[in-house]
Amino acid sequence: MENKKEMRKWLDDMNLGHPLVVAGPCSAETEEQVLKIAHELKDTDVSYYRAGIWKPRTRPGNFEGVGAIGLKWLQKVKEETGLKTATEVANRAHVDLALEHDIDLLWIGARSTVSPFIVQEIADALEGTDKIVLVKNPVNPDLSLWLGAVERLHSANIEKLGVIHRGFSTYEKTKYRNIPEWQLAIELQTRFPDLPIINDPSHITGKRDMVFDVSQTALDLNFDGLMIETHYDPDNAWSDAAQQVTPKTLVQIMKDLRIRKETDEEAEYMNNLTNLRAQIDVLDNQLIDLLGKRMKVSDGIGKLKKQKNVAVLQSNRWNAILGNMILEGEQRGLSEEFVLKMFKAIHQESINHQEKIINA
Ligand code: PEP
Ligand code: MN
């Protein structure tokens, strides 16, 4: 898939002057709910009104969406508010129904992007239409799988394309519902600068209090827009209650976000600087996280040594690590002096930890 400016023409043509905002409830619940939220979002920066009609739930027995009837409610939204509409499709039948009801933007969910069969089925069903299609990242952090899905749509002559970054599943418990792995999105942007990328802070955080910060990071990283789940009564939403914000909060978030404009040279410089700093912040957080993990493993070694009554300092092992790291560092442009200093500090912290364990 070569870089194609046409891919982002749909977005550029909107001439928004601010990031694209897609907002609305996680799920369409009732006609009244869908219309009430839409009316509250009517005179805001929101361009597309989202509502899940078919909900891919992790376990059976949860609310699985209202189905096709909800598409009629979305049509009413368009008639009454002028907002364009958006929903998730996961098979050919969904696509056919969404087209029948004139939904403007379709997205492929994270659980569908992992399946080339599903993506191909959706691409085939959409061939010959001129809908906007956004591909959410797959649940696992696999850039090729994500891009593969975009390629399938592109090969089906769908030109109005984009991706949605909604974070990745982990076994490990973290402060996020789905960890952002920002470097993956950064790599995607570097490889395909013309592919619009929208951030979904709702599914990344899983918590409404964190939505603002993740949105700001996304904008600092030059994302083109945001998809934010919005409900007039978030706590009583039928799905994803903890992460939805009220329309009022959404408007406040949009007001408080620092939005950079790429107008003159100075703005361009500030834009580049903010973008690079945001990348550094992401990497620094990863560094601290990794060092914390390393220390936990080191604690485990301390416990083993305590059981066997073995000395904390094992010089042979330490010299081998240092030798290796100096070589690895060299290949990455890091001086021997720096690598030595850094690993001495890490080693010292490890020894302190292990001493504490052994003497406990
Ligand atoms: C959604 O947008 O409501 C949704 C189900 O998202 P995801 O595919 O990112 O889990
Ligand atoms: Mn949701």
Image (cartoon, helix red, strand yellow):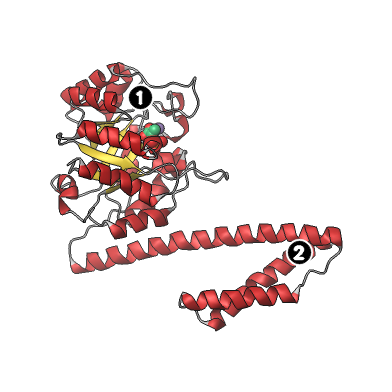
Q: Amino acid at mark 2?
A: Gln
The C terminus sits in image quarter: bottom right
Query: How many numbered discs?
Result: 2
Residues 256 and 154: in front is 154
Q: Look at 47% across and 22% down and name the residue there.
A: 62
Q: Look at 35% across and 18% down and name the residue there.
A: 66
Residue farthest right in this picture: 309
Q: Is residue 171 above or below residue 337?
A: above
Q: Look at 31% across and 39% down and name the residue there.
A: 251
Could you tell which of marks 2 and 1 lies nearer the N-terminus? 1
Residues 182 and 245: in front is 182
Residue pointed to by mark 2: 354
Q: Amino acid at mark 1?
A: Trp
Tell me residue 278's x, y (percent).
39, 60
Q: Quadrant of residue 52?
A: top left
Relative placement, left or right, of 195 versus 12 is: right
Q: Quadrant of residue 160?
A: top left
Disc ID at residue 19:
none
Relative placement, left or right, of 346 versus 165 is: right
Residue 341 can be seen in this image: no
Q: SS class of the residue under badge 1?
A: loop
Proximity of marks 2 and 1: CB atoms separated by less than 8 Å: no
The local crowd at label 2, few if under 14, some if 14 to 19, many if 20 or more residues have their Cα within 10 Å, is: many
Q: SS class of the residue under badge 2?
A: helix
Label 2, label 1: how far apart the Cα atoms are? 52 Å
**Quadrant holding ligand 1?**
top left
Tell me residue 236's x, y (percent).
45, 23
Between tags 2 and 1, which lies in front? Answer: 1
Disc ID at residue 54:
1
